[in-house]
Amino acid sequence: MNVNSSAQSPQVVRGRWGFYPCGVETYLKLKRLNALVHQSRVIAASWARWNRKQPQNRIVRQTLRDTAGRPVGRVPKLNDEGQVIPIPEPRRPIAAAFIRPPGKNFDIDVAEAIGLDYHNARYPKATEAEVTPLILTPAQIDEQIARYETWCG
């Protein structure tokens, strides 16, 4: 999926500690979106751990303990019929989307753009000239929130 970004005029907001590239509402949306991206990365890592195991090793194991309660080994856990219980497949990672930042000749991952925008919106700049505009427009931020919330549940 390719998301096109249009050149936007930077909206600079003066705050208590300096200048910001967006208002509080947009910042809170970016904060929520950044949390959703982090959650999706955790889910993707869970799937990657499951996927790199060979099928015969994707099973639930139980720990054997001696009379003192110390672990002494692990064996496959069996269900009532005596069959090995497989580890269920976690959700697959969300599909990557790419965006071309204004004035750039290459695409970047939307998740990376979200992290950059969140960092940019979080920390103030001393002067108005130092403020860099956000990569994503407010409409694109809303679109990505809907996309990640649908996927993350």
Image (tube, grey):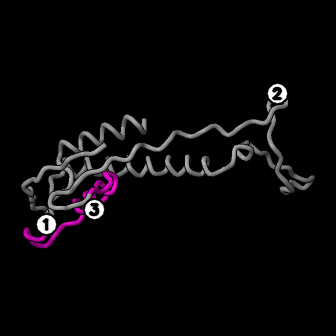
Crowding at mark 1 (Cα within 10 Å: few <14, some 14-19, many 20+): many
Residue furthest right as drawn: 67
Q: State yes or no: discs 1 and 2 in contact (Cβ < 8 Å).
A: no
User: Which amino acid type is shown beneath numbered disc 2?
Assistant: Asp
Is 125 within the magenta?
Answer: yes
Residue position marked by numbered label 3 in the rendering: 119
Secondary structure found at label 2? loop
Can you say which quadrant of the picture contains the N terminus? top left
User: Which amino acid type is shown beneath numbered disc 1?
Assistant: Val
- The spot of residue 81 in percent (x, y) is 83, 26
- The spot of residue 106 in percent (x, y) is 25, 59
Secondary structure found at label 1? loop
Residue plotted at (13% across, 50% down): 6
Residue plotted at (81% across, 32% down): 83
Crowding at mark 2 (Cα within 10 Å: few <14, some 14-19, many 20+): few
Q: Quadrant of residue 119?
A: bottom left
Residue plotted at (85% across, 31% down): 82
Q: Earlier in the sequence, mark 3 or mark 1?
A: 3
Secondary structure found at label 3? helix
Q: Is residue 71 toward the left or the right of residue 32 in the image?
A: right
Can you say which quadrant of the picture contains the C terminus? top left
Residue plotted at (13% across, 61% down): 15
Residue 80: mark: 2
Q: Is residue 89 toward the left or the right of residue 86 in the image?
A: left
Q: Which residues are magenta?
A: 107-131
Decide which of 2, 141 is in the foreground and name it.
Answer: 2
Q: State yes or no: discs 3 and 1 in contact (Cβ < 8 Å).
A: no
